[in-house]
Amino acid sequence: MVKFKGNSYDFPHFLGCGILANSYFEGVMVKIESHVGQKGIKGMSNVKNIIAIASGKGGVGKSTTAVNIAVALAQQGACTGILDADIYGPSQPVMLGVQGSLDMKNKKDLIPIMRHGVQSMSIGYLIDEKAAMVWRGPMVSMALQQLVFDTQWDNLDYLVIDLPPGTGDIQLTLAQKIPVSGAVIVTTPQDLALLDARRACEMFRKVNVPILGVIENMSSHICSHCSHEESIFGVGGGQRFAKEYGIEFFGAIPLDIAIREQTDSGHPTVIAAPESQHAKRYHDIAQKIKAALALQPKDYSSKFPKIVVET
Ligand code: ADP
């Protein structure tokens, strides 16, 4: 029996995940297909598509972007989950506004916590933050695989994986063991962040994970007093980057105190201010990610029956 200790989880937009899967969004039938992961890695029966959100550098707003995209996908009618793959420093519990922890007796109890219409899982729900800090390679790799494969995801169309920055053990495990349908790179426009984003791209290319596109975050600053827009980190870096790698530029999100305040207080912008320009940008990006994914080859492996040859 799983008990959740902490604040009660809410369903502000949905009766429950799964109910709106394959249903209608703005009058359009939503039917989401599964797309292939890396060669030799079997797809998951309860997750159709895994989307990895990555950045080369920390602090570029990858987790903020990941949670807003995941909630936007759910708001658009897809059954969506988010997995916080940052074992050393999980931030999704705070960004989703989940306090407390899962009461785990065995692995069947790894039930995702429903929040803002999204099924979520994070190491932060399971152990004290400091406990994982001493873990090294194999333990981190095992922890990530358990979070992905043992969590009782309920029929997901999309599982958004919020990766930690860089190209370390967690990224390697993701590349070698987890069927990723596509990766999305988040960067800020300045050269330093783009340099690191290039490393992330090279890594995904090497392991044959398709890079769906790039999101430029903190692209310009909007003054909260006069609404003046200023490009603190430079202009057009994300577009240049997308061109260089031949990938899609999904769009730009400005640096705005409202995004920080909303997301850091557990109410991502698409929940806190669904009618705002920023929420519209997140929704637009989520649509583009879905469209880019839809162009990838489809995966029918989970639909094949298991054939047993008896002699
Ligand atoms: P990362 O995952 O890349 O390390 P985070 O998503 O944790 O970065 O963001 C770092 C900080 O920047 C957080 O406090 C977050 O609220 C803030 N932040 C992210 N994106 C924006 C934005 N577009 N405007 C304002 N603040 C942002």
Image (tube, grey):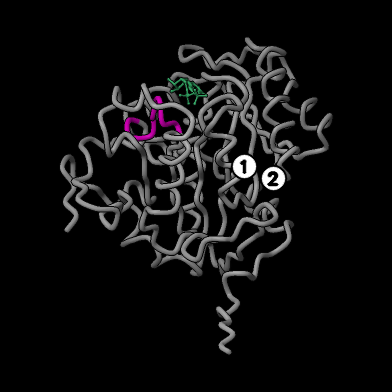
Residue 100 is a magenta residue:
no
The amino acid pointed to by label 1 is Ala
Q: How many marks?
A: 2
The reply to whether the C-beta atoms of the residues labelled 1 and 2 are less than 8 Å apart is: yes
Using the image, determine if residue 29 lies above or below residue 226. below
Q: Is mark 1 within 8 Å of ligand 1?
A: no
> Which of the 4 image quarters holds residue 237?
top right
At horizontal 58% and vertical 82% (from top left) the residue drawn is 307
Q: Nearer the viewer, residue 127 or 282?
A: 127
Residue range highlighted in magenta: 86-94
Q: Residue furthest bottom?
A: 311
Q: Say left or right for 165 vs 21.
A: right
Residue that label 2 marks: 209
Secondary structure beneath label 1 = helix
Q: Nearer the viewer, residue 119 or 150?
A: 150
Q: Any mark on residue 175, and which?
A: 1
Residue 93 is a magenta residue:
yes
Q: CA distance from mark 1 to mark 2?
A: 7 Å
Q: Nearer the viewer, mark 1 or mark 2?
A: 1
At horizontal 65% and vertical 12% (from top left) the residue drawn is 233
Q: Say left or right for 12 vs 50.
A: left
Q: Nearer the viewer, residue 206 or 215?
A: 206
How crowded pointer 2 is (Cα within 10 Å; few <14, some 14-19, many 20+) is rated as: many
Label whose residue precedes the other's in the sequence (1 or 2): 1
The amino acid pointed to by label 2 is Val
